[in-house]
Amino acid sequence: MTDFESGPIPGPEILALPPGRDLWVFAYGSLMWDPGFVHAETRPALLRGYHREFCVSSHRYRGTLERPGLVLGLDRGGSCRGLAFRVEAATVPDALAYLWDREMSSGVYRPRMVPISTAGGRLLACAFLADPRHRQYCGALSLDDVAGRIRECCGERGPNIDYLANTVVHLHALGIRDARLEALHAAACGQSEVPCAASPGLA
């Protein structure tokens, strides 16, 4: 058994993808600027019904078991602006293998095919949603609680606040403004405005 509450962590077959078809992947966090898989096209995209949120405890990369940090997930409610990547059929297996290795190690995310809106029309895309049943899910925290954990925690990939700062910086570079993340960064830094300065490699 794994951390996945309903049994072993599912593989890419859970998406029930038709063979020989291109795949769209919806990115909302570090996948936006560091996708790590081959793709043929990128489009700005809007996902309704979920929003970008620091709702996943990080026991390794941005925190420890004793002092868990927080990383992003797609949580219920609102909407989220991100990017959609089109993966050509021939490279879909490699892309999914990479994504599963990157996102599904603990089973805290639920991979789903979700409808997204783009300038080229509506599409179905693979998205990794935060699983509210998982023990690493913590979506009920207040902004101040989230800011406090991010301010204090550090993991294998560095301080949690670097992850937040780099997220805000990269979203700005992509022309995406996220008011809640900017308010969270201000609270975590104890500042009234977001100073867009961070190390790009730490996200």
Image: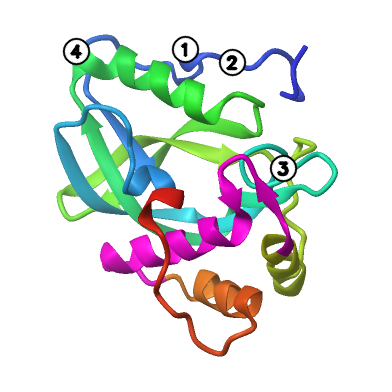
**Residue type beneath disc 1:** Glu
Query: Which residue lies at the image location 47% right of the left edge and 12% below the top edge?
Result: 13
Q: Are marks 3 and 4 in contact (CB under 8 Å)?
A: no
Amino acid carrying mark 2 in the image: Pro
Magenta segment range?
A: 152-177
**Amino acid under disc 4:** Ala
Query: Which label is found at residue 106?
Result: none
Q: Residues within 10 Å of mark 3 (few under 14, many from 20)?
A: some
- Magenta-span inclusion, residue 155: yes
10 Å crowding of disc 2: few (<14), some (14-19), many (20+):
some
3D distance between C-alphas at marks 1 and 2 = 8 Å
Under circle 4, the secondary element is helix
The answer, for residue 191, to whether it is visible in the render is: yes
- Residue 13 bears which disc, if any? 1
Query: What number of labels is visible?
Result: 4
Q: Is residue 72 visible?
A: no
Q: Which residue is mark 2?
A: 10
Q: CA distance from mark 2 to mark 4?
A: 22 Å
For this orientation, the residue located farthest to the bottom is 192
Q: Amino acid at mark 3?
A: Pro
Tell me the element at label 2: loop
Q: Is residue 136 left or right of residue 49?
A: right
Q: Which mark is residue 132?
A: 3
